[in-house]
Structure formats: structure tokens, C-alpha cells
Image: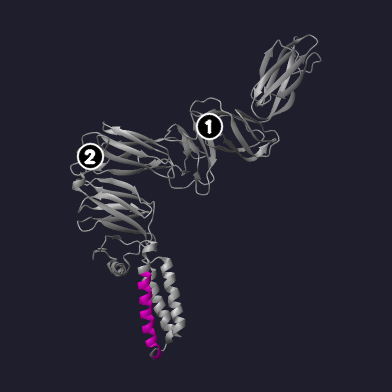
Amino acid sequence: MYESSPHAQTSFESEQVPNTNDQNITLNCTAINGCKTINYNINNEGWIINNNTPIFSFIYSGAGSHSIQYYSTDNSDNNETIKTSYFTTYGVGKFTFRDENTFALVSTDYNVNPNINGVSSGTGTTLDLNFQGITSGTYQFTFSKTGYGTRYYYTTLNEFSSFDYNQLMLQDTNGSNLSLTIYNSTGTTLQQNTPVTITKNNYIVGKYLTDSSGIITPFLKANDTNYLFSIEGYYTTSQRIVIINRPIWDTNLGLISGTWQVTLTSPQSTTRYTITTNSQAIGILPNTTIEYIANVCMYSGSTCDPNFIQRNYLLYFKGLVGETSIQPYMNLVSASTQRTLKVLNYTTNQPYPLTPIAIYTKTQNGVNYLVESLVTDSTGTATTYLNNLQQYTINTNNSTYTIVPNTDNFTYYIYVNFLTLNNPVYTSSDTNTQSDINAPLDEFYNLRNTLFNTCTLKNDCFPAALIAIIITLIVLLVITSMALNNFIGIKGLSLVAFICLTIFFGIGWIPIYVYAFLGTISLLLLVIVQ
């Protein structure tokens, strides 16, 4: 039991150490017959006893509001009544700027928005911040330097926030702004307005907030696989490893002997691997908005062997999901045929540019494999080598199509969006099968294709527009001649004609602007004939 004693009294003093979250605490004991011990307990963490020292000073670290209990015992073992005092340690922040390649200190321009206790901008190798009295909320730090890429740190702060970071700066000749689309771990949902912290060797690269499309654009070193991405509240990931195996024949599945090459085109640069072993490990960054492309070929001298087919593969990870192994299947150019795939919008007949296409088929023993994955060019076109009379499955735009190439057709039109046919694959002559349950509709498209087979791009559609006008004139002239003998009159017949033309031209073959032009002409003719 503690007793009040005039022989021992303890005083308390505290002061925060500048630019730290440390509190310098002093307990001073006075007693007539001398002080034996000073006892204290901070935040109920447990009692600590210090012997034979009338003045005891120590450092307590940690931002926040704290309480301290304390008492002294004199040399007669009389205990002072327990006292309680309070102290507050405010948060501080510090950035130390270093070169990403050398880790040497580098003077950097900084901007703080909103300002923190009057600090809004400046230049130096360090940035010290005192958070006492600041408004709780979000703050953005911008770091820049001539000859270096700009980096950002976006975070939420309050009076008790605390950090001490080494902030890396990268020379602009060593990196570029890389667009990353951030998904959840399963790659199914975009992470909007989500903080993403990027580190390298435990140093800070930056902290970014995804936009409404889940995109951030950090300045990163090309093909550096040492970055670590922490998607706040979800998952942490680094580089993803993809194993590319030695090419095999697409006929007997035997290994193709000799040196082979992988050319990896990342969103930032191109790297070539010349390989003699049976596999090659490649590291790629996850969540890149633009896919990596791996070109695989057999190697001859200083370039790809022109006698062999080359294959391309799109490599990317959405969240933690993506291809981890690629097995290229190849053949001689002389044993296969180059085909053209053109992806078009079903409703407008306009090309789908930069659209991923994945092509699959089966081996002779029935094993399904990826033949190639491609991206269409600005005209919605991609080329690939396919074998005659072999069935291929094409995946694009969340739809699946099947083709069996033959010796007569080399171009295949793939229509996506709006209405999907069971077998919506058209060669240059738009061959359809009667087994297709949409065959009547396909025949309808054959008629349209006969009339408008050049209308695939904007500058091709003037012949189609001319034919549309001629057909409209013919129909309206027929209607005019029928008007006097038809009880619904010319207005009704013109409306019927307009609806029929809408059905014929508006479903999808003719682009919208051609249909609008057709409609205008029809209405003008309607006024004229009345």
C-alpha cells in the first residue's frame, strides 16, 4: 500500500525532440533522506523502476496522446502517492531524396498540396515536415528535378502521422511513364480510387491513387523487375515470371532443334533473348495497360530463320491472374498459309483497332493449345499462319468463333458486338453453311455484301451511299405510282418504304452516317413527291 510521504516528491517535464516523434521525458525526485527509486508506467504498458537516480531522463517514441503514472520511493522505503500526467507527441514526416541507380543523395524540387504548416515548395536533399495542428485529410507531394522523371506521393495525414522515407528519383534517360490498370487479385474488377504504393529495395518509388478507370501512370525504369506494388487493402505483387518453352512442331509435337529467340516488347522497351536451352524465364510487370508481346522464332545467324513461322504471344497479368507458361507450336512457312483476320463492329461495320485476338486449336491427340495471341492494327487487321482444313477457335471481345481454313479463302471477317451469329466468320466471298441456324440471316448478308463489299472504312463507303440513294429513288417512284390506288396514301407508303429501307440498311452493314444520309434523302423526296 502506498503512503503519502513528505520525504519524496516527483516532478514531471516533457518536450518533443524537433523533427522526430520522440518525447524527452524528465522525472525529478526530491526527498529529505534521499531518493531510492523512481517508478513510472506509460500508457499502462507496465511499471519500470530506476534505482539510485534523483533525476531520470529518457526518450519515449511514438506519436499520439499519452499518459504517464509515476511515483518515487525514498531511502526509508516510503512511497509517494501515484501521480498522473499527460503529454502529446505530434507526428513528423521526412523524405530523403536518392538517385535510384546509385542511391546517392540528390537535390530535388518538391511541392506540397495543400501546404503543411507553411511548407508548400522548396528544394533540397531532404524534406522535413511537422504535422502539429494540420487538418486531417489527403495530401499530394510532387517530386521533380531537371533530367529526372517526376514522381508523386499521395497519402492521408493527421496530426499523429509519422514516416521517414528514402524517396527514389530516376533519371529520365532510364525510364518512362508507364500506364498501369489496377485490378483486384482475380483480375475481374477495376480498383477505382485505390492507393497503390510502389517500392524498390524497401525505398519509396511513389504512392498513387487510381482514377475512375483504375489507372495510374508512374515513372518507372524500363524492364526493372525489382518493383513491389502494394494495392492498399487488397494484395501485394511484384514481377510475374513467365516460362517460354522451346518451340515444337505442330505436327508430331517433337522439339525443334537449334538456337531460338524471344523478342520481348514491353510498354517501355524491347529486349532480345537468344536461347540454346529448352526454356527461358521472363519477368514482366503486372497490371500494365498495354500488354507485353513476346515474339518467338527459330534463330539463324543474326536474325529469325525465314524458313520457319514466327509466333507472337500477349503477356499480361490482371491482378494475380495471367499466363505463366507458353508453349510455341511451329511449322515451316512452306507447310502453312498466311491468313488475314479482320475484326469489325457488327452494327457499324467499322474496324476494331488494337483488339486482342487469341487463336486456339488441338493437337492430333486432342490437346487444346494456344496457337498465337495478337493485337489488331489500326484497321482492325491481324495476320497469322494457319493450316488448311484444321479447326481453329478464335477468342476476341468476350466472344468465341470457329473457322476451318481452306485453299480458297485467305481473309476472314470477324463481327463482334450487338448480335452474335453461331458462326460469324466470313471469307472474302462470305461463304456460309446451311447447317448454321442463322443461314437465312447469313444469306441476307450475302446480298448486302454483294452490294456493299467495299464499305469497310469511311473512304470506301461513297459507292455504297450512291447505291443506297438509287435504291431509295426507285422505291419512292414505285410508291408514287401506287399512291392513287392505295387507301393509305403516299404518306403511309413512304413511311412503309422508309421502314423497309431502315431494316435493310440500318442493321449493320452500312455505317451510321451513311444511313443518316439515306434517311435525309428519303425525307426530302417525300416532300418533293407531295
Question: Which image quarter is the N terminus in?
Answer: top right
Q: Secondary structure at mark 1?
A: strand
Q: Is residue 395 visible?
A: yes
In the rendered view, would you say 56 is above or below 236? above
The verdict on residue 478 being magenta is yes
List x then y, in percent, for residue 460: 36, 64
In the rendered view, would you say 2 is above or below 345? above
Residue drawn at x 36%, y 84% is: 478
Few, some or many residues within 10 Å of mark 1 (<14, 14–19, 20+): many
Total numbered badges shown on the rendered structure: 2
List x then y, in percent, for residue 77: 74, 11
Frontmost residue, 134 versus 175: 175
In the rendered view, would you say 90 is above or below 517? above
List x then y, in percent, for residue 25: 71, 21
* Marker disc for residue 169: 1
Residue 527 lies left or right of residue 453; in this view the side is: right
Frontmost residue, 528 versus 430: 528
Q: Are marks 1 and 2 in contact (CB under 8 Å)?
A: no
Residue drawn at x 80%, y 13% is: 7
The residue labelled by disc 2 is 248
Q: Secondary structure at mark 2?
A: strand
Residue drawn at x 30%, y 54% is: 341
Residue 392 lies left or right of residue 377; in this view the side is: left
